[in-house]
Image: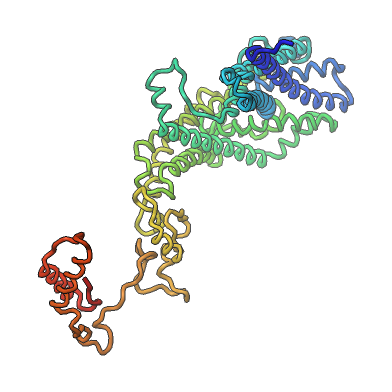
Amino acid sequence: MTQRSPQVTVRRNRTLALASALVKGAVAAGLGLGSLTVLVMVVWISSPYPDSGPGGALRAAAGVWLLAHGAGLVRPDTLSGVPAPVGMVPLLLLLGPVWLAHRAARDAAESQESQESQEGARDEARAEWRERPGGPSRVGAFCAVTAGYLLVVAGAAACARGGPLHADPDTLAFPVALVVAGAAAAGVWTAAGRPFGPAPSWSPLAVQEAVARTLFRQRTEAAFRSAAAGLTVLLGGGALLVAVALGRNAGAAQDAFVGLAGDWTGRIAVLLLAAALAPNAALWGAAYGLGPGFSLGTGATATPLGLDGTPALPRFPLLAAVPDQGPGALPNWAALAVPVAAALAVAWFTARRAAPADAPRARAWSPRETVLVTLFAALGCGAGTALLTAAAGGPIGTGALSVFGPVWWLTGPAALVWTAAIGVPAALLLRLWRLRTPGWAWRRDVPEADELPEPEAEEEAEEDGAVPGRTRRWWAPWRARRATVGEDGEAGRAGPASPAASSVPAPDPAPEATPGFEPYDFLPTDPWHGKANREARWASLKQGSGGLMADFPADRTAGRADRTESADPGGPAATP
């Protein structure tokens, strides 16, 4: 029998791993399509008067699944006979395909990493082949998963053709392929441990050097976290605005919900559609609070200043939250608090990293670094807002309904301006506030130098309840005075605690304050401290040291001892 060479084995393993990654991408797409198809078929079966047969329901499910990826749909059956586009993506449906593609790419990349570790445990005779592992590379896993997923997308687009909702071929490349590729790339990046760098070789040298610095990576990470916090607060504020508006117009929302369907099956379908469009409504509310508002057709725009024009509103429960026509009142202007809260969130998360409570003052960021990180976070918040609002709106028909929802190229810059204009001064003020020292001693237990506290001082501080390096809370300023408060709860005469009050004992009272004190009544009178005895002891110590002791004059030593006795008459006598 002939033994298979290591090179043939590695190539065969790499081919099998690529095929496995391709299958994983196809399975991920099939799971998303199958789950949505089951939901559509359940609604179709429970409907008492379906418009089409099972084939039409399957084609409609394929079209809705493509819409969840951002594809534009075309509805050919209209009253006017003109095909109507449907471009508004239900963002809640987008989460399923993105998560499935992300997980498939992550699993494919992780299996490659595990195969590398298994090959590393083989015999040392194949060490030259371990550098070329049998699993696919990260780029190979990404390409295989994306290709497998897009194969199912192409099949679903072919299946939806001829149905009530078929996909526009131009939108299959963008944004469908881009969404799938982005999710797969994020999965591979997650499997690699989410590294930040190195920069590509084709990038400028200045970019490569900046990415290689640890300080730059830390500042960039802090900016991304602050931008994510600001975007989250912005979406939460928009959802709150929609909830309040729906509560005020609950009657109109109920009438629209009941009027769209007379049976329970139709009402459940309307409820599911409203739930899928709930993130879109939150983004509409955020755009309304930012100022640009949203379009309600080609001739109407809703902003906090009022609703201009005649809106073309379909009958739908979520659209009952649209403000009434006319100029805006005080409740409408209160929506401007949403971007203010988002800007303050960006400032707070930046200031927490700029001046940590458990770090010395020397490690705090400079004002310039704080401003740059805040501006970068504001840029990220604006870019994320523009991207999400671009997907939250879109055409839902022809004519006046061809423009519906927020305008991304206005909402994104508005978010950038709000977060930068308020976030930068707020971040600087919070940085100064966190670095303060007088009054509220919440940073006094932090060592100023980049050194660890001494063990003795730390033990003494633990006994008094103040451990060096432990974070103090701004809402508990009384902890700084704990060392000066007795067990009975009464403060001492010393007042507020000093920085070293927890580790330095209180000084003894002066000897003059002791009753019956007489000066010089404690000086010794024995001959041990005489000059002759001192010189004799010094000569004996020098002779016994074997010449290691320096030859100091006896009179200089005696003079130093006399000065010590005259300077400290209340202390113990010095012994040479």
Q: Nearer the viewer, residue 134 or 490?
A: 134
Residue shown at 38% from the left, 49% from the top: 360
Say how many tags the image has: 0
Residue 222: % across, % down: 47, 36
State the quadrant of the N terminus: top right
Residue shown at 25% from the left, 81% from the top: 511
Q: In the picture provided, is 471 more to the left or to the right than 190?
A: left
Q: In the picture provided, is 36 more to the left or to the right than 514?
A: right
Residue 86: % across, % down: 68, 18
Could one spot residue 491 in this view of the protein? yes
Q: Residue 42: which quarter of the image? A: top right
Picture layout, residue 496 above or below residue 14: below
Q: Residue furthest bottom?
A: 516
Residue 57: % across, % down: 82, 19
Q: Nearer the viewer, residue 398 or 124?
A: 124
Residue 379: % across, % down: 46, 29
Could one spot residue 300 in this view of the protein? no
Picture layout, residue 47 above or below residue 459: above
Q: Nearer the viewer, residue 143 or 414?
A: 143
Picture layout, residue 118 above or below residue 508: above
Q: In the picture provided, is 56 more to the left or to the right than 181?
A: right
Q: How is the image coloured?
A: rainbow
